[in-house]
Image (spheres, rainbow, N blue to C red):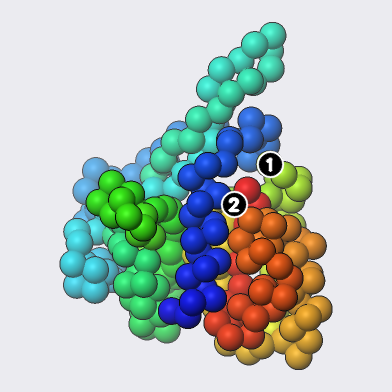
């Protein structure tokens, strides 16, 4: 991992710690957990896939948990506060894997699982200050769902920027599909307001691509890369890009 990436990651961590919650939560879900069996082994998932996840991570496979916003308190018929809760979805996961390790595992599993009609990705990105107070080590869940279309992951997680730019989940997906016309990438991390993608073919015009990312998700620069030039270097050197709506 380069110093450029580490610098950007530190900036995101610092902002994540000190940011204030935005009460204008338009990405609300009111549904509760979908009906799932009590035991992960009773799900309609290949035993081979479950055992593979456990072998790669050294952890017992769990259900896939997705973070959703729910109305918390109303006043005069208007919601004034919200709380985030985890709900089960139709998938499996290995929870709280160290960032670098999680990324390597997903990279190694992607083709194999895709050929079997499964999608693997990272979610529930967080920073473990309890066990790593000095640096807040990044941790992520490795998740697997059934399917072939990676945009189904973004639909499931409901990634959007509605709390700052009124960008809906559909708009996010359409923008990524638009970019796929001139660059190639694989979705790696998907959260409610955050996406990371690994670039397999760089766009011919990196300057234009970086400007489009900044226009679509300003927090990528304003609270992450710091400058448009740093974002360009990150795309070119690391062959990654990310979207973030804080």
Drawn side of residue 195 relative to residue 34, left or right = right
Give me the C-alpha separation between circle 1 and circle 2.
Answer: 9 Å
Specify the label residue 57 is tagged with: none
Q: Residue at x 63, y 89 (%)?
A: 201
Report crowding for label 1: few under 14, some 14 to 19, many 20 or more residues within 10 A (C-alpha): some
Question: Going from the N terminus, do you reach mark 1 or mark 2 first?
Answer: 1
Between residue 188 and residue 148, name the one nearer to us. Answer: 188
Q: Which residue is mark 2?
A: 193
> Quarter of the image holding residue 236?
bottom right
Work out whether 2 lies above or below 213: below
Horizontal and vertical percent position of residue 97? 30, 62
* Residue underneath mark 1: 163
Tell me the quarter of the picture where residue 239 sits: bottom right
Question: Can I make out residue 150 in this image?
Answer: no
- Position of residue 16 relative to residue 175, above or below, is above
Q: Quadrant of residue 27?
A: top right
Q: Residue at x 68, y 12 (%)?
A: 77
Q: Is residue 123 left or right of residue 108?
A: right
Nearer-the-camera pick, 10 or 237: 10
Badges 1 and 2: C-beta atoms under 8 Å apart? yes
Q: Is residue 103 left or right of residue 56?
A: right
């Amino acid at each position: 991992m380069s110093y450029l990436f580490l610098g950007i990651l530190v900036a995101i961590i610092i902002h994540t710690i000190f940011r204030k919650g935005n009460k204008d939560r338009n990405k609300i879900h009111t549904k509760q957990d979908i009906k799932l069996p009590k035991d992960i082994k009773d799900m309609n998932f290949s035993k081979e896939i479950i055992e593979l996840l456990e072998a790669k991570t050294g952890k017992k496979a769990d259900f896939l948990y997705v973070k959703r916003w729910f109305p918390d308190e109303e006043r005069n018929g208007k919601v004034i506060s919200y709380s985030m809760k985890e709900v089960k979805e139709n998938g499996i996961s290995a929870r709280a894997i160290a960032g670098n390790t999680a990324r390597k595992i997903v990279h190694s599993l992607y083709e194999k699982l895709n050929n079997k009609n499964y999608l693997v990705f990272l979610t529930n990105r967080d920073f473990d200050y309890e066990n790593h107070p000095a640096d807040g080590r990044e941790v992520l869940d490795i998740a697997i769902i059934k399917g072939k279309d990676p945009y189904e992951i973004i639909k499931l997680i409901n990634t959007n920027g509605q709390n700052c730019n009124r960008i809906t989940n559909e708009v996010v997906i359409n923008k990524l599909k638009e970019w796929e016309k001139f660059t190639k990438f694989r979705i790696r991390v998907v959260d409610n307001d955050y996406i990371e993608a690994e670039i397999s073919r760089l766009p011919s015009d990196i300057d234009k691509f970086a400007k489009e990312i900044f226009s679509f998700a300003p927090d990528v620069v304003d609270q992450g890369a710091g400058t448009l030039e740093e974002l360009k270097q990150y795309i070119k050197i690391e062959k990654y890009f990310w979207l973030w709506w804080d």
